[in-house]
Image (cartoon, helix red, strand yellow):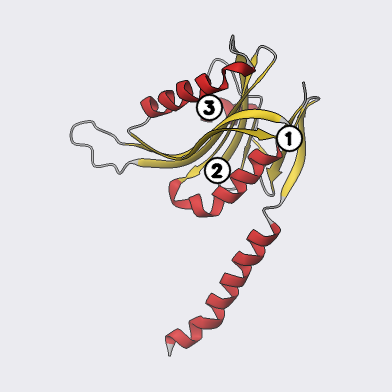
Amino acid sequence: MKTLRLFPFLTALVLALFAFTAAGPKLKKTTLTNKLTVGIPDGFVPLPDDGIAAKYPSPRKPLAVFTNPSGRVDFSVAQKPTTFSSRDYALLLKIYKASIQNMYTKVDFLSEDIRTVNKRDYVALEFVSSVTDNRRGSNLPPVRRYQFVQYTIQGNQLMVFTFNSPAEEQPQWQPIAQAVMQSIALKD
């Protein structure tokens, strides 16, 4: 009897999921600089400077960070000087993949390639990372994150676009992360 009561609910849920994926995630075109626009997911808000400093402690603050209402999912844009050029993308893919593997206890790569988005090439790495607390006596479970990172060179700057969420929320956020990364429009 309980199964019959759940059937209309499950049917509505499946239809809603199909409608969501058919229409695609809703993104708001946002201008970050005079040369950079990106689609930001509905409901995401800019993180204020003190929030950025607390969540992303670094001598070089990101250009922008957007977060969802719970604060568990972020999209950030950073830039830093580089001596690499756009001819070095194959090398950058190897370097950043190795760097990511060294940062985490375990990394499962979902995709790793050089792709073109809006007429610009990007090194793209999509993965699930795990960090395990290996201190003696620690009973904490590993911290797992879904992450999608794209890198591109603009002049003498490396632009880094990062979308991350808890790994258990990957099914919900992965199509949104992919849409955000496809929306990046960076002019020379």
Q: Which residue: 51% across, 82% down?
A: 7
* Front position in the image: 19 or 120: 120
Label pair 1/3, CB-CB below 8 angstroms: no
- Give the mark nearer the N terminus: 3 vs 2: 3
- Residue type at mark 2 is Val
The residue indicated by pointer 3 is 56
Query: Looking at the image, is 75 positioned above or below residue 10?
Result: above
Of residues 178 and 78, which is closer to you in this image? 178
Amino acid type, label 3: Tyr
CB-based contact (under 8 Å), mark 3 and mark 2: no
- What's the CA distance linking mark 3 and mark 2? 13 Å
Residue 118: numbered disc: 1
Mark 1 and mark 2: Cα distance apart in space: 25 Å
The disc labelled 1 sits on which kind of residue?
Asn
Where, by quadrant of the figure, is residue 149 drawn?
top right
Front tag of 1 and 3: 1
Is disc 1 placed on a helix, strand or loop?
loop
At which x and y percent is residue 58?
Answer: 52, 19
Q: Position of residue 131 (x, y in %)?
A: 35, 35
> Mark 1 against mark 2, which lies toward the viewer?
1
Examine the rendered structure and indicate whether residue 5 appears above or below residue 96: below
> Is 169 positioned to the left or the right of 28 in the image?
left
Residue designated by label 2: 73
Please report contact status of discs 1 and 2: CB closer than 8 Å, yes or no.
Answer: no
